[in-house]
Image: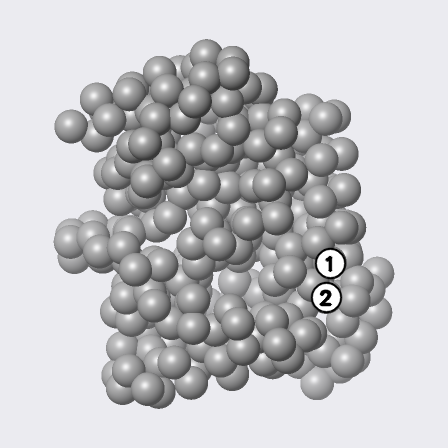
């Protein structure tokens, strides 16, 4: 069923100048991913949002890219009002397999992957596991290991991940909404109005799904898998001077870039840049600078 749906989606987007099919605009389910297509011609770009995100994260990015590219905006099952997957297996593994199946079924020639946060982590591990399916990738504040977790043992990572999962799962619906707002205000964006607007969008994701993906991300270390990633990688990190802490110490923008570069040292073709001032949702705080960096990367690769 998923393969047939994906083939239909490919056919709808294969002809330059064609009108997108209604099913493509509404989204097609491929494994544990919902996929929307935007644009009718050009090289393929796949956008993957972060934890609790949906295509709304990429609104400006889609409007820009669809002029010259076929853009596929994916949503992980359980996010942005979509049903959560069954409890079986590792959900990051299932998202990885679904993305690979989608690319193969649609005969996409080494698309550029763009992932934010958790989506960036998914894109990085995908590039290592499927170098033949990846033309390049841009990770937006997403890393192969959760920042800080490289300093603890695998057992400690697992324990911390379990604690994060329990805290999110155990929250009441109102507490979950409050968590999303507090996160956007303190970590997500520098703009208070943007935080107020975006937090309810994150909060419409399935609470237990958010907890599950968060725990899988926090407990994992994909650094060694990047050795097999042959595609060029651009890591875009955020930097805001008032938030620039590493433990108790203040850090500079150059120090944060160096730290991210170290976490990506196993990737043979990785480059790290910082956009400032911005917080975690770089595309919301610095839309023009983000758009330029993304377009420059796509044009170069």
The residue located at (60%, 41%) in the rendering is 63
Quadrant position of residue 155: bottom left
How many numbered discs, if any?
2
The residue located at (55%, 50%) in the rendering is 59
Which quadrant would the C terminus be assigned to in this image?
Answer: top right
Q: Position of residue 238 (x, y in %)?
A: 70, 62
Quadrant position of residue 194: bottom right
Judged by depth in the image, the label closer to the viewer, 2 or 1, is 1
Q: Is residue 237 visible?
A: no
> Helix or strand or loop: what does disc 2 sit on?
loop
Quadrant position of residue 66: top right
In the displayed structure, would residue 102 be above or below residue 158? above
Disc marking residue 286: 1
- First reached walking from the N terminus: tag 2 or tag 1: 2
Query: Which residue is identified by label 2?
Result: 278
Q: Position of residue 289 (x, y in %)?
A: 77, 50
């Amino acid at each position: 069923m998923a393969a047939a749906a994906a083939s239909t989606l490919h056919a709808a987007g294969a002809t330059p100048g064609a009108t997108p099919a209604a099913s493509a605009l509404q989204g097609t389910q491929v494994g544990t991913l919902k996929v929307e297509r935007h644009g009718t011609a050009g090289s393929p770009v796949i956008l993957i949002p972060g934890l609790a995100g949906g295509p709304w994260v990429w609104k400006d990015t889609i409007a820009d890219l669809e002029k010259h590219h076929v853009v596929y905006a994916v949503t992980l099952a359980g996010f942005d009002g979509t049903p959560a997957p069954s409890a079986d297996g590792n959900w990051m593994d299932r998202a990885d397999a679904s993305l690979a199946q989608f690319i193969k079924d649609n005969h996409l020639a080494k698309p550029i992957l763009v992932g934010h946060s958790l989506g960036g982590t998914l894109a990085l591990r995908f590039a290592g596991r499927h170098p033949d399916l990846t033309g390049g990738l841009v990770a937006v504040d997403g890393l192969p290991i959760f920042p800080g977790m490289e300093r603890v043992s695998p057992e400690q990572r697992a324990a911390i991940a379990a604690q994060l999962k329990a805290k999110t799962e155990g929250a009441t619906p109102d507490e979950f909404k409050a968590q999303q707002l507090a996160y956007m205000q303190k970590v997500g964006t520098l703009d208070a109005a943007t935080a107020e607007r975006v937090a309810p969008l994150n909060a419409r994701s399935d609470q237990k799904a958010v907890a599950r993906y968060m725990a899988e991300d926090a407990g994992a270390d994909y650094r060694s898998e990047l050795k097999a990633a042959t595609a060029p990688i651009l890591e875009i990190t955020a930097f805001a001077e008032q938030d620039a802490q590493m433990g108790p110490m203040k850090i500079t923008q150059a120090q944060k870039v160096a730290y991210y570069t170290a976490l990506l040292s196993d990737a043979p073709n990785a480059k790290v840049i910082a956009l400032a001032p911005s917080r975690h949702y770089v595309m919301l705080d610095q839309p023009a600078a983000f758009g330029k960096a993304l377009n420059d990367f796509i044009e170069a690769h």
